[in-house]
Image: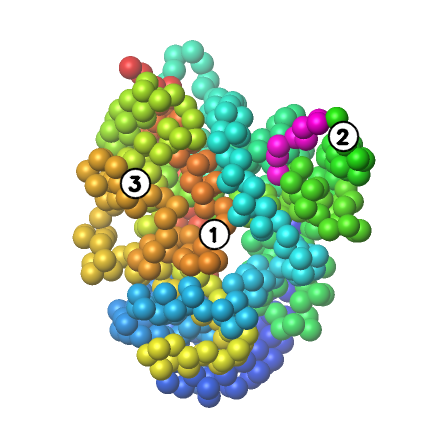
């Protein structure tokens, strides 16, 4: 990706400053004067300091606001707008139930990653792939499980390499391995063999995912009239679509040909995401190789970034607390002995589920992002003017001792009810657990993500020993990076893997 730091530093902080501060902060501040400001000043000329602070210390700003104004709303400055955060359970429920034409999740998502520029206008205007994720992906999860697990086993075997037969510890970059393994696993379900193992295809999808995240963050800094110009320098949609289309051309062309014929012989179509996209794509330009290749890239973006990040966090917590591996291993091996490997048997792995849910509790920041398309007033009287961005202070809620006992302590069995059938499974949302959002716009892929993560963690604990390098930091989680409201796992620290010894 070509991103010029001079553009980021000079043009963005000079031209955008005048436009954004005056247009957004002066006008909208007057309508939200009753909502307290944290992280900086509400004065137009000083609000830019709050913007800069939010880019590097959003976590501290949000915790400060939650501590001061728990039970109320507060706001802080982000590039281009104010962000209002809700803190009470009642407000979280109101946010979840608000009509889509009033508080909009898609509109907020479009802004968060600048969808028209990073994913393309076709995705912004017609996200038909989302309904596929909500319905067909989960309905077919049990049928796909054997293929999914087969790819997970093969991918870990390929990525965790040992130097010799002595079976000593091998250091790996967890973030890189997690992204590769997740990419292979999800694409086994998305496009099948052999494409899911094609190095070029995998590289394009991983590169596109990172490009969307970084480009969206950069483009967001600029006023609307400059965004098309900036996007030309930092997005790689045409190149990525062309490369994926080249890898999928023969497959898509043949499937389109078959789909366009009248079939009367009872032939079964492939049962994967690519086939569902072909069957659901509107007639016209969406039923072309390039359009379908773009959809595959977009669904990969939705799956790869968050899932690989969560897997990285999970491996770090397992490495920092290797004593938990024996407990997890005992559960997994008992379930497999009694029920075998299946989508259903994952439901009996309560400790695995609890471990992952606890990891997700301690690694989020905000969720339930919405953009007000109309004026909205919460029941406590807080007025949200049209155009305002609203979210839940999920990390602060997750660390609130009113909701969780000893919230600052990583307790892997917190959600397992002592290991006897925990009711708070990973994909369940409520007004105190907001990793996947809550309400009608809770993440549509969270059930699929939970299946992948549980299968991967179960595989890791049964096949490997995991730890950090011996020393004073062997029990510490590597410090993450914060980019605005995103917590990025440390990319430099190696995790030591060793084939499990009985």
Q: Is residue 436 magenta?
A: no
Neighbourhood count class around disc 3 (C-alpha, 10 Å): few under 14, some 14–19, many 20 upward: many
- From this view, report whether residue 475 is shown above or below residue 213: above
Q: Is residue 256 visible?
A: yes
Q: Is residue 318 visible?
A: no
Disc 1 or 3, which lies upstream in sequence? 3
Q: Which residues are magenta?
A: 266-273
Q: Secondary structure at mark 1?
A: loop
Q: Secondary structure at mark 3?
A: helix
As drawn, is 425 to the left or to the right of 402? right
Looking at this view, name the residue that lies furthest to the bottom.
Answer: 30
Please tell me which residue is depicted at 33% across the width and 79% down the height of the picture: 380
Q: Which percent across, then down, holds residue 14?
A: 60, 75
Neighbourhood count class around disc 2 (C-alpha, 10 Å): few under 14, some 14–19, many 20 upward: few
**Residue 354's disc number:** 3
As drawn, is 346 to the left or to the right of 413? right
Q: CA distance from mark 3 to mark 2?
A: 48 Å
Q: Which percent across, then down, holds residue 182?
A: 51, 36
Q: Nearer the viewer, mark 3 or mark 2?
A: 2
Give the residue pinned by disc 2. 264
Q: Which percent across, then down, holds residue 33?
A: 40, 86
- From this view, report whether residue 433 is shown above or below residue 71: above
């Amino acid at each position: 990706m070509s991103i010029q730091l001079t553009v980021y530093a000079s043009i963005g902080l000079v031209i955008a400053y005048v436009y954004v501060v005056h247009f957004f902060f002066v006008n909208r501040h007057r309508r939200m004067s009753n909502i307290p400001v944290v992280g900086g000043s509400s004065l137009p000329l000083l609000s830019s300091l709050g913007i800069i602070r939010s880019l590097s210390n959003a976590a501290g700003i949000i915790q400060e606001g939650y501590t001061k104004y728990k039970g109320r709303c507060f706001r802080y400055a982000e590039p281009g707008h104010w962000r209002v955060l809700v803190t009470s359970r009642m407000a979280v429920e109101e946010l979840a139930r608000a009509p889509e034409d009033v508080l909009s999740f898609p509109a907020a998502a479009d802004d968060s990653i600048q969808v028209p520029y990073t994913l393309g206008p076709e995705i912004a205007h017609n996200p038909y792939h989302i309904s596929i994720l909500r319905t067909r992906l989960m309905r077919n999860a049990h049928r796909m499980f054997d293929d999914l697990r087969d790819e997970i086993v093969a991918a870990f075997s390929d990525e965790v390499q040992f130097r010799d037969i002595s079976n000593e510890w091998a250091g790996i970059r967890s973030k890189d391995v997690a992204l590769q393994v997740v990419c292979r696993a999800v694409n086994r379900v998305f496009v099948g063999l052999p494409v899911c193992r094609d190095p070029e295809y995998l590289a394009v999808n991983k590169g596109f995912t990172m490009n969307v995240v970084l480009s969206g963050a950069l483009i967001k800094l600029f006023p609307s009239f400059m965004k098309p110009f900036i996007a030309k320098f930092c997005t790689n949609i045409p190149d990525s679509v062309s490369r994926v289309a080249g890898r999928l051309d023969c497959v898509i062309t043949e499937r389109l040909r078959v789909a366009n014929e009248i079939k009367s012989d009872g032939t079964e179509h492939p049962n994967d995401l690519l086939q569902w996209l072909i069957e659901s794509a509107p007639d016209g330009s969406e039923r072309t190789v390039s359009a379908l290749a773009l959809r595959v890239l977009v669904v990969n973006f939705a799956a790869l970034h968050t899932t690989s990040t969560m897997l990285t966090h999970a491996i770090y917590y397992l490495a920092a607390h290797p004593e938990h591996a024996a407990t997890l291993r005992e559960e997994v091996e008992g379930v497999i002995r009694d029920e075998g490997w299946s989508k259903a048997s994952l439901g009996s792995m309560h400790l695995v589920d609890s471990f992952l849910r606890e990891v997700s509790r301690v690694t989020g920041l905000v969720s339930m992002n919405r953009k007000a398309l109309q004026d909205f007033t919460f029941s406590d009287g807080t007025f949200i003017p049209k155009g305002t961005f609203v979210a839940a202070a999920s990390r602060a809620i997750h660390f609130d001792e009113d909701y969780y006992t000893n919230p600052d302590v990583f307790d892997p069995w917190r959600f397992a009810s002592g290991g006897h059938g925990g009711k708070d499974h990973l994909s369940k949302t409520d007004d105190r657990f907001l990793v996947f959002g809550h309400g009608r716009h809770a993440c549509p892929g969270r059930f699929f993500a939970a299946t992948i993560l549980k299968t991967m963690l179960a595989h890791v604990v049964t096949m490997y020993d995991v730890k950090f390098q011996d020393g004073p930091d062997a029990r510490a989680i590597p410090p993450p990076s914060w980019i605005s409201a995103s917590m990025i796992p440390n990319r430099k620290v190696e995790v030591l893997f060793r084939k499990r010894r009985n």
